[in-house]
Structure formats: structure tokens, C-alpha cells
Amino acid sequence: MYSEFDLDKIDLSAIPPAEEPDRQYYFMAKCREWIRGFEEKNGRIPSCCVTTFGCQMNARDSEKLVGILRRVGYQVTESEDADFVIFNTCTVRDNANQRVYGRLGELKSRKKRNPDMKIALCGCMMQESAVIEKLRTSYRFVDLVFGTHNIFKFAELLCRSFEEQGMIVDIWENTDQIVEDLPVERKYPFKSGINIMFGCNNFCSYCIVPYVRGRERSREPEDILQEIRQLAAEGVVEVMLLGQNVNSYGKNLKEPMTFAELLREVEKIEGVERIRFMTSHPKDLSEELIQVMKESRKICRHLHLPLQSGSTRILERMNRRYTKEQYLALAEKIRREIPDIAITTDIIVGFPGETMEDVEETIDVIRRVKYDNAFTFIYSKRTGTPAAAMENQVPEAQVREGFDRVLKVVQDTAREQVARYQSQRAQVLVEEVNEHDEKLLTGRMSNNTLVHFPGTVELVGRILTESRDECQRF
Ligand code: 5AD
Ligand code: SF4
């Protein structure tokens, strides 16, 4: 099997290997030849920029793209004034799609100035056929389009875009393939996301994710643990286990394993000091997981537990498969067992058929659970989901009113919660020099609260005990 260190040894006159990941290493070597050609012609190294929209999963996918781009010889920049720009897109809400179209318009004028420039689009939005149609008709200057299922083939697609003229579109409907051992370039040296599973089987009626990310597939535990051991050896102290619903991890493995069992194994890895995970569906959160979290020294005191709505009637229409009472009982049990935990959530306002009474139910849950933070979204109609076909879409004015009411309670509760930690001493992982004041550092507490305190750049990546003066939640 090839690795990223073998690129110079690969025989490019041979036919491409059929097996993965060798096939992709072959194409990386081939892309490298193209990049060398660019350097000779232009007397400089080409630059690339990967812009990520959406969630942590996309952020991790972007790290994989950057890993390959760097290996084939690109210089990575943050500026979209680059020779190769990729948008890794999100389609969970329509405003994310609109932003991509807006930004594409800006790229068009850049490409006019730099005709060698390449533009690629990938991610969830590309799994929608209406989007592909629109790109083919109105955005013909895009060079490469691929989706979520074939991202592991990026090197091969990049190579094709060097060899062929015109827009290349390669979208797969679905896959159960998981390709291991491709290069990844982490954004932070001291913390990393790790995919533990892909896709989602829950089909919440408003959500497009199961259609664009496909059915649930778990990675083998040994592959995950090996990746984390390697990360720890490279100096990573905080890992974030990623999946659309981590609580159903392991169900489809040949030898099934629960998420709590996986966490116990991760806990044993030396060098890993903090373990986080995203996201937990309340219907699948087990007693075993609560106990593992309670006993753990390393699992962070933070649980993201999406509520979506506090009204049992709306939850049923959303196909969430829990009631208001069940959610409240779960949150209460978690707070009882792990008193220092922070609970955060996602809330949707304006789901079809939602009344002001339903919004009041949501507000009641916020007050009772006392969320440390909540992301509040206005319902966005996603074509192809069951909710898009439901009657009683809520009028905009009512949605706005409900949204503002929810937001106010969320902010009040979050402020009360954060006041609990004022002037306490707590362990923080230093993440960066503060954006606004270079004399300050920004760090994250175990419970996900961000704190700012005086310090210098060499402390970035270290875990310190700090007293808290000013704090801000994310
Ligand atoms: N409209 C608004 N918000 C949505 N989310 C998912 N789908 C939609 C939609 N159609 C929200 C949910 C989810 C978060 C990631 O995005 O709250 O938890
Ligand atoms: Fe979407 Fe529901 Fe799956 Fe989350 S659990 S990704 S909201 S379908």
C-alpha cells in the first residue's frame, strides 16, 4: 500500500491501481506533475483556498481536501484570490445555498482576471439535482463539481480537471464505501475532529441531511483508535468525535459496539486529555453513555442535545421520536448525574403548523433545562423533505415574532448560566491569540465556554488553569 511519502516512487506510465487508497496516491503523483508544469510556466507555486460552509463534518472534509492539495504541491492561503478555489457547501438551510451563489458571482470576475484559475464546488449542496441543473446553465465557469460520497476521489477528479476541458460533474447517489489512510491537514495542531460515522438514518421531516449524506455507516473502531493514537503522537490533546448521531455509532458494524464502549477505548489513549463529541440525538442517548461521561476524567463537561421543539405535537410531526416530557426527564437526569455539565441545543422556529402555544412550550423547555447556549434557526423549507409538502406553512410575521421570543429567553438563560462560573478557576485549552487584542489569549473550558485572559502566543495548545474574568459563550 502506498502512503503520502511514496509519491515520487509511483510509476505513472503504469495503469492506475484499482484499489483504494493506492488509486488516489497514483493520481496525487500525477497532479504533482501538473503542478510542476505550472511552476515552470509561471515561475511560482500555485495557491489554493478552501472555503467551508456549515458544520464540523464539512470542516473535517475540508481538512482532507487541504491535505491532498498540499501534498500535490499547492500553497494553501486564506484568500479567495487564489489559483484554485473550492467551496465546500452546506444545504441544511436555504440561506447557506444563497450565500454560495453570491460568492460564486464574485469568483467569476476573479476568473476573468486570472484565466488559469480553477473553481471547484463540493459538499452537501451538490447532492441536489436542482443545484446541478442551475450550475450547468448559469455557472458554466465552474471547473469541477463533486458531492459528499466521492470526496475520497478528490485527487482523481482534480487530475481529470487538469486533463479535460469544460465542467466536470461527478455526483454519486450513495455509497457504503469508507476509504481510510488518505492525507489530512489539520487546521489546529493541538485539536482535531475525527469522523466516527457518516450519514444519518433518522429522517427528521424537516432535514435534508439523510438525502445528501446517505445512510448511516460507522467506521471500524480499530481504524478510529489508530487515527487517534497517531494524532496524540503528533501532539493533539483534544479530540472531537464526529457523526450526525453519535449515539447510534456501531450498530451496523460486523461486530457491533456502542458509542459508550468506543468512548471508553478512546479514554485509554495516552496523550489525549480531552474528548468531545457531536451530535447526540436525544432518543438514542443511553444510560450507559451518562455513566461513562460521569466516570470519565477526559470527556468534556458539555453535551449538545438538540431539542428542535418543545411541543410534543410538533416533535411528532418532525419525526423526532421523543416527547417534551421524555426530553425534560433526560435533561434532568443528565444534570443530576453530572452537575457541572453544560447543555446546549438547536431549536427550529416556524415548522409547518407551529402555533404560538407551541412556541410557548419550547420556551418552557428552555427555562426548565436552562441551556448554556442554544442555536435558534428559522425553519427553512428543503425540497424533497416530508415537511416541505406539509400544509400550514407558518406566515413570516408569526415566525419572526416566535423567533424573537425564543431568542430572548435563550440569551437570558445563557447569561444566567455563564454567571455561575464567574471568578472561578478552571482548566482551559488555549486555542489562539485573541482576534481583537493581541495581549489576550482565547481558551476553551471543558464545558465549551470561551474565556479571554492575558498571555502570549507560545501558550497556544497548552492546558492551563485560569481564573475567569471575562467570558463569552459559543
Ligand atoms: N430548517 C431550519 N433548521 C434546520 N436544521 C436542520 N434542518 C433545518 C431546516 N430545514 C437545524 C436543526 C439541526 C441543525 C444542524 O440545523 O436544528 O439540529
Ligand atoms: Fe437531520 Fe435528524 Fe439526522 Fe440530525 S438526526 S442529521 S436533524 S435527520
Image: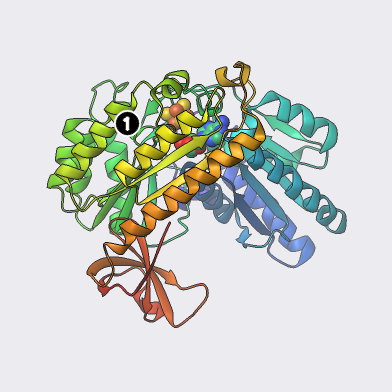
Look at mark 1 in the image and give the residue it sits on.
282
Q: Quarter of the image containing the C terminus?
A: bottom left
In depth, the one of 248 and 419 nearer the eye is 419
Above/below status of 344 relative to 331: below
Q: Is residue 51 shown left or right of residue 341?
A: right
x, y (%) of residue 341? 24, 50
Q: Is residue 391 left or right of residue 192?
A: right
- Under circle 1, the secondary element is helix
Decide if residue 92 is in sight here.
yes
The one of 309 and 110 positioned closer to us in this rendering: 309
In front here: 448 or 395? 395
The answer to whether mark 1 is within 8 Å of ligand 2 is no
Quarter of the picture containing the N terminus is: top left
Which residue is outermost to the right?
A: 112
- Name the residue rendered at 30%, 23% in the picture: 253
Mark 1 surroundings within 10 Å by alpha-carbon count, few (fewer than 14), some (14 through 19), many (20 or more): many
Residue 136 position in % (x across, y down): 80, 31
- Is residue 156 something that shows in the picture? no
Q: Amino acid at mark 1?
A: Pro
Snapshot colouring: rainbow
| Rendered position, 182 above or below 465 | above
Give coordinates of residue 60: x percent, y percent.
47, 46
Image position of 96 (left or right of 242): right
Q: Residue at x 51, y 31 (%)?
A: 356
